Amino acid sequence: MKIALLEGIHPVAKENLEKQNHQVELFKQSFADDELIDVLKDFEAVGIRSKTHLNEKVLQNSPQLNAVGCFCIGTNQVDLQAAKKLGIPVFNAPHSNTRSVAELVLCEIVALSRNLFDMSSKVHKGQWEKSASGSYEVRGKTLGIVGYGHIGSQVSILAEAFGLKVIYYDVVKRLPLGNSHQVGSLSRLLKESDFVTLHVPETPETKKMMGEKEIATMKKGSYLINASRGTVVDLEALASALDSQHLAGAAIDVYPSEPKKNSGGFETNLQNARNVILTPHIGGSTQEAQFKIGQEVSESLDIYFSTGQTIGAVNFPNVQANPMIQGRRLMNVHKNVPGVLGEINSIVSKKGINIHSQLLSTDEEIGYLLMDIEAGANEAFNEIGSLSTNIKTRLL
């Protein structure tokens, strides 16, 4: 397969894919819609990070695209529904950078409680202001974690080692790790926490979930950390709470609108705020994390292209395939309507083709079928591909 890797994805991804005889081209940058469509016309798969947006327009104008790899945790930069309807599975790396994000959060908790950013800036400017005023230990304080998934639970473990009391809020019941415990409402967590850290996905429900009301509910003198998604926090409300000194500080790694390329000129209303750490979306940007992400997603793409397996795809029925192909393997994505499997089996049967095995998994909209068949596969492939219910058919 010809695969494009955008946004400076770790070279290990290219190495792994080329070892499996895929043709890979690396691009350091991201592309806007029309330019991206032009780039993708030569590739059957694409690997992206957070800056590239694969919207419906791009996907519909890339008919040769068979798979997408998101070399990160988030997949909100891809129109998952449009991709699914076009028969394009999307893979990501849900675990690989959890430690990197968790370590950054713990670093920021200590830095905020000691005013390290402001102290360091003053010394860089030649000012010497040694003082313990407004500087505190984190031991014995309460950390509130909003979203207790892969990252939130890692933060929980590290935080307890620092002597923090940990509480968390999640919309689903989660098993507590260590001595942490789940609270029943966001409001309670905000009222009880000295530090609040957010680890939620970008959804309509989480958009500005930390608005003026929620920030006002936080303890006076507490701190807010957001390394999740930029739309989760109302930055104007946060700036106001910092200006009034209701909050003692904040650390923000993600923003509602972020540049597509590294450059100067980025602005936010928090840039002159006191005791605020601003970073350019680097929560998962460590060499270790990018290496692991490169390995994980490239492996998912290769397994999909070589066997049809979709385990780990975020928008697709998950099918675990036998790596050994008997004869030829037909991969068919179709509309999930009654009778499709019967039609496909009828085509194969009428041609006298023996079926070694078949696997089918469906969701409410599509079905995904893997079928190992004997001689005559090309004829069956053409006829199955012409069915009105067909979305995408490939033959291995």
Image (cartoon, rainbow, N blue to C red):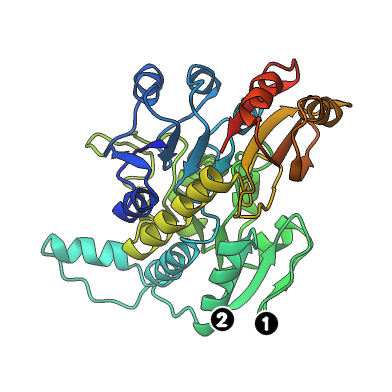
Question: Looking at the image, is 81 positioned above or below residue 281?
Answer: above
Residue 10 as seen in the image, left or right of residue 45: left
Out of 235 and 266, give the one closest to the viewer.
266
Residue shown at 34% from the left, 61% from the top: 286
Of labels 1 and 2, earlier in sequence is: 2
Q: Which residue is mark 2?
A: 160
Q: Position of residue 206 (x, y in %)?
A: 64, 43
Q: Position of residue 19 (x, y in %)?
A: 35, 53
Q: Quadrant of the C terminus?
A: top right
Indicate the amino acid at tag 1.
Answer: Asn
Alpha-carbon neighbours of circle 1 within 10 Å: few (<14), some, or many (≥20)?
A: few
Circles 1 and 2, Cβ within 8 Å, touching? The answer is: yes
Q: Position of residue 248 (x, y in %)?
A: 46, 61
Residue shown at 36% from the left, 25% from the top: 42
Residue shown at 57% from the left, 77% from the top: 157
Q: Which residue is mark 1?
A: 179
Residue 49 as seen in the image, left or right of residue 311: left
Quarter of the view holding residue 393: top right
